[in-house]
């Protein structure tokens, strides 16, 4: 098993983030340079564009973690293979391409439609739509119903605004476990993360502590698409303590228990902007049942609340999928291997025993696949994580800021 050396200042120094949508990274047509996104509607039920099969109508479905909700953007080309400025083709993980059949958007193995990504300033900052070149924008039909179909209608309509966001957190199974820190937007500036406080104790946001199992969480599927349980490294699953008044959900506190009934959650993308998730108690009778933070309390506890940009905007920061967390993560206090230089948007790895590098956005999206080149050019200003592998098998994750 490889040792992972994690640069913990990713959390302690704060996370670079924005509500506004920047242009997605353009991928290669082949698999040499791919960045996969979830295409997330910000209004309606906050569904994600899903490939429903060859020539089947696309739908906006609950986030599931399935590969049929992953898409990449490639440059559109003319008949002579020349790039067409500002036009793109959107490709599903299956290899099918986004197409419009005259009635609905579909995923097609034989046809595609050229897409323009239009932006405007709106509630979420820079908002985006997917628009057919020379035509209308992608629109959710009956956006407040489950799994709405996607058609072309209008432009910046309420049911059309979307973002290219990160994939759903990796789903853990009996044989595979992906561990995360969970961090509310209101806790980012102080580096606080969701913390398990013991059996049936209220969850809190507290300062990161190195190698603390109480701050590590995994997402488990229930067998129903879009339904998840969240479990701590201790084995305690998130539960909810209902105060019984039936009036003010904010009085209900989320806890964690090894024996109690786990809450079934749905992930959602609307009202929280780019790079964040909202997580809702599926079975709650009220719509005010989002996993939220009581930011006025120190340490902030976690309650049921309204969906909101700050208090319910939640980021899953991937840590590792190693089995033994305590022995496979080391705090990077002094690490001579982490030797990089930044000039403009070019990052150079200067270590002698460098073997390969992969580049990720701060959200966890892969920007560049593993490469043995010691120099990478990053596409835009922002925060990036370099996962640098060395000849002894160790990996060093380094944060860089491109201005």
Image (spheres, grey):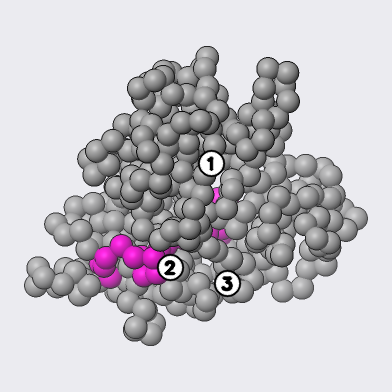
Q: Quadrant of the C terminus?
A: bottom right
Q: Residue at x 40, y 61 (%)?
A: 123
User: What secondary structure is found at the residue carrying circle 3?
Assistant: loop
Is residue 142 shown above or below 339? above
Q: Residue at x 65, y 60 (%)?
A: 382
Q: Picture coordinates of residue 40 (x, y %)? A: 42, 45
Mark 1 or mark 3: which is in front?
1
Outermost residue to the right: 352
Q: Does 319 lie within the magenta span?
A: yes
Of residues 239 and 363, which is closer to you in this image? 363
Outermost residue to the front: 134
Q: Picture coordinates of residue 76 (x, y %)? A: 63, 29
Q: Residues within 10 Å of mark 2 (few under 14, many from 20)?
A: many
Residue identifier under label 2: 184
Q: Earlier in the sequence, mark 1 or mark 3?
A: 3
Q: Earlier in the sequence, mark 2 or mark 3?
A: 3
Horizontal relation, residue 33 to residue 131: left or right: right
Mark 2 or mark 1: which is in front?
1
Q: Picture coordinates of residue 252 (x, y %)? A: 21, 71
Is residue 172 shown above or below 262? above
Residue identifier under label 3: 14
| Inter-mark Cα distance, 2 to 1 | 29 Å
| Inter-mark Cα distance, 2 to 3 | 12 Å
For the record, the magenta segment spans: 303-325
User: What secondary structure is found at the residue carrying circle 1?
Assistant: strand
Mark identifier at residue 117: 1
């Amino acid at each position: 098993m490889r040792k992972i050396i994690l640069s913990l200042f990713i959390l302690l120094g704060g996370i670079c983030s924005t509500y506004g949508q920047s242009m997605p990274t353009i991928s290669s047509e082949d698999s040499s340079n791919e960045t996969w996104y979830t295409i997330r509607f910000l209004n309606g039920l906050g569904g994600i564009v899903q490939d429903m099969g060859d020539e089947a109508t696309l739908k906006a479905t609950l986030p599931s973690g399935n590969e049929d909700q992953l898409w990449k953007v490639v440059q559109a080309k003319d008949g002579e293979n020349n790039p067409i400025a500002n036009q793109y083709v959107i490709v599903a993980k299956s290899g099918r391409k986004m197409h419009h059949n005259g009635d609905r958007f579909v995923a097609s193995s034989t046809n595609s439609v050229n897409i323009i990504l239009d932006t405007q300033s709106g509630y979420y900052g820079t908002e985006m739509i997917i628009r057919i070149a020379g035509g209308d924008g992608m629109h959710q039909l009956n956006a407040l119903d489950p799994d709405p179909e996607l058609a072309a209608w209008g432009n910046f309509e309420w049911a059309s605004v979307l973002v290219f966001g990160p994939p759903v957190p990796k789903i853990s199974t009996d044989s595979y476990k992906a561990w995360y820190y969970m961090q509310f937007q209101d806790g980012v500036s102080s580096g606080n993360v969701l913390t398990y406080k013991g059996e049936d104790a209220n969850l809190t946001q507290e300062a990161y502590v190195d190698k603390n199992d109480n701050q590590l969480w995994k997402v488990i599927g229930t067998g129903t698409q879009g339904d998840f349980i969240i479990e701590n490294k201790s084995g305690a699953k998130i539960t909810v303590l209902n105060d019984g008044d039936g009036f003010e959900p904010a009085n209900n506190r989320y806890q964690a228990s090894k024996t109690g009934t786990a809450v079934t959650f749905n992930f959602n993308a609307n009202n929280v902007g780019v790079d964040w998730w909202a997580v809702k108690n599926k079975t709650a009778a009220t719509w005010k049942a989002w996993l939220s933070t009581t930011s006025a309390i120190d340490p902030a506890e976690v309650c049921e609340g309204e969906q909101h940009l700050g208090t319910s905007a939640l980021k899953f920061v991937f840590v590792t999928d190693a089995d033994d967390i305590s022995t496979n993560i080391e705090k990077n206090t002094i690490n001579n291997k982490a030797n990089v230089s930044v000039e403009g948007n070019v990052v150079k790895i200067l270590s002698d025993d460098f073997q390969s590098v992969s580049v990720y956005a701060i959200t966890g999206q892969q920007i560049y696949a593993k490469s043995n080149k010691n120099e990478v050019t990053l596409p835009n200003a922002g925060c990036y994580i370099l996962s640098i592998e060395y000849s002894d098998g160790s990996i060093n994750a380094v944060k860089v800021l491109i201005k």
